[in-house]
Amino acid sequence: MATNINTASRSGAFAPNPAAKILQALKNFIPTAVAVAVLLAVWQLLCSGEGATLPGPLQVLEETWDPLIINPFFQGDGTDQGLFWQLVASLKRVAVGYMLAAVVGIALGILVGVSTLMFRALDPIFQVLRTVPPLAWLPISLAAMRDSNPAAIFVIFITAIWPIIINTGVGVQNIPQDYNNVAKVLQLSKLKYFTKVLLPATVPYIFTGLKIAIGLSWLAIVAAEMLTGGVGIGFFIWDAYNSGSISEVILAILYVGLVGLLLDKLISVVAKMVVPEG
């Protein structure tokens, strides 16, 4: 019997069927497609009347097809750029601020997690600062840095750092005591304890903080760019609104949502690669 099973396994009898996977993926997508179709139909119905103040999906498509949709790589002068370059500019700012927040946040989270003294000293400060709305930091950063680009990056940093610190600190504090006891019995050095015990046990919590932080970063940069100006999807939305191009605003919002979804999925994929299952 075992021989038959091994033979069947080698012959691929139990190998996943690609066609079945594709079919299952399509079946899973059907409810989403139906929901999107209903949403578009309701949107079109509500915006088709004489007193409608917002364009319907068909009008948005018609007014933004050329050049925003079919030519997202357009490059003009100054802020006259295609949506691709607007999104790239925003993503660059998010990448810098987010990476800085990840490095500093993980380090501070580990510090307050392993040291009761540091937790008592810093936690009240963290709890006060994390409640400050992201845009409240923008005037301070503009006054200090005298440049809109680093100021926007600082807003990303200060927005993203708090969930990373808190989740990392909680992860360190929740390391099973048995792990610490084994480390003491084996007399592990601080470096080995960090790499073999603390970091593996804390990684799931760290990625929870990172996933929350990426969403907050994307929200904050769009809002910050509306005030700082320059090339970026946030200023594009604000400029389109001031120009009366509501269809362009709606299209940009859809792009913002899709990019935010992709960023969230990206962190989830990395987490699955790093965090051991079970």
Image (spheres, rainbow, N blue to C red):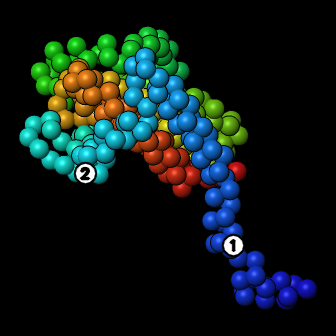
Judging from the image, what secondary structure is the residue with disc 1 in?
loop
Q: Is residue 14 above or below residue 115?
A: below
Q: Position of residue 265 (x, y in %)?
A: 50, 46
Where is 116 relative to 270, above or below? Answer: above
Q: Nearer the viewer, residue 135 or 260?
A: 260
Q: Is residue 197 visible?
A: no
Residue topped by disc 1: 16
Label 2 close to label 1 by CB (< 8 Å):
no
- Residue 77 picture location, percent across and down: 8, 40
Q: Residue 63, how many percent across, how many down? A: 30, 38
Q: Residues within 10 Å of mark 1 (few under 14, many from 20)?
A: few
Tell me the residue at 68%/74% (across/down).
17
Q: Which mark is residue 139?
A: none
| Residue position marked by numbered label 2 in the rendering | 71
How far is disc 2 from disc 1 in space, using C-alphas?
40 Å
Looking at the picture, how far across and down is residue 36, in whole percent?
56, 41
- Under mark 2, the amino acid is Asn
Q: Amino acid at mark 1?
A: Pro
| Front residue (pair 238, 35) | 35
Q: Is residue 78 visible?
A: yes
For residue 110, side relative to residue 99 (left or right): right
